[in-house]
Amino acid sequence: MTTSPHTEALLTDFIARALQEDVGLGDHTSLACISADSRNRAKLLVKDPGIIAGIEVARRIFQQADPEANFQAHLEDGAAVSYGDIAFEVECNTRALLLAERLCLNTMQRMSGIATLSNRFHFEVEDLPVKILDTRKTTPLIRFLEKWAVRLGGCNNYRDGLYDWFMIKDNHIEACGGIAQAIERVHQYRIEKELEHLGVTVEVRNLVELYEALEAGHITRIMLDNFEIPLLKEAVAIVNQRFETEASGGITIHNVRKVALTGVDYISVGALTHSATSLDLSLKIV
């Protein structure tokens, strides 16, 4: 899978720092037990059904631990897996293999859990014209991996950070003194900083705020936060495609289809990253 230069740089740095965190002054057990020139082959075993994610990350982990590692993927990232499947095999220096093992498993289990949950949400609405979005509720410093996993599961990334989309939320509105004031300040800032290419979302909590946002304009999307289903449907009709609509707050696997059927364009789900359960995987020397 091709990754951008930015992702490659993040990945290289992440692997180096993660290995240093684990290894510290040395893997004393392996240094004591394993000869320096020993080589072994191992396979990654799947122990839970779901969506596999992080195989390409694992490849880079082993190649960074041992540049002469021979990595053979048997599955692609994003593939559906069942108990007993073998995701990949790797042959490399044994000390490097044991050094990289836990980082590989921790990363893949986390990414696969997110991809699996994302895929469940995607499945619920795949026949409807709506997109499921993730949020910034991610683990610090590995957001790029978690958002990668969301994409592998079939859902979509909202924004990578505070820098690539304007999102006027309740705290911004309260601090500015109102929706109209917050939108106007963002509008002027976009012009001054030549950031018109960035989208603008404004959060509203009721129909009164919705009408305020509609009157103010200068926005891309209206986030309808914690609206009950009947009110959400009414709000979508009021907007009438003048702006994009997004539902957020309290979205679960049990109600996401009902929310999608209201006609919203987007549904943001923080649970994709903050509530995913890791997929059980193990790495065994053959």
Image: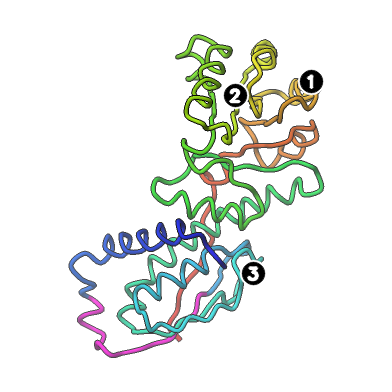
Q: Nearer the viewer, residue 98 or 130?
A: 130
Q: CA distance from mark 2 to mark 3?
A: 42 Å
- Judged by depth in the image, the label closer to the viewer, 2 or 1, is 2
* Residue corresponding to mark 3: 82
Residues rendered magenta in the picture: 29-44
* Residue corresponding to mark 1: 234
Residue 11 at x, y = what percent? 41, 61
| Residue type at tag 1 | Glu
- Crowding at label 3, few (<14), some or many (≥20) Cα neighbours within 10 Å? some
Quadrant location of the N terminus? bottom right
* Residue 85 to residue 194: above or below: below
Residue 143 at x, y = what percent? 46, 49
- Crowding at label 1, few (<14), some or many (≥20) Cα neighbours within 10 Å? some
| Residue type at tag 3 | Ser
| Residue type at tag 2 | Val
* Residue corresponding to mark 2: 202
Q: Secondary structure at mark 3?
A: loop
Q: How many marks?
A: 3
In the rendered image, the residue lying farthest to the left is 25
Quarter of the image where one finds residue 258: top right
Q: CA distance from mark 3 to mark 1?
A: 42 Å
Q: CA distance from mark 2 to mark 1?
A: 18 Å
- Marks 2 & 3, CB-CB < 8 Å contact: no
Q: Residue at x 49, y 57 (%)?
A: 110
The mark found on residue 136 in the picture is none
* Residue 32 inside the magenta-drawn segment: yes
Q: Residue at x 79, y 42 (%)?
A: 129
Residue 220 at x, y = what percent? 65, 29
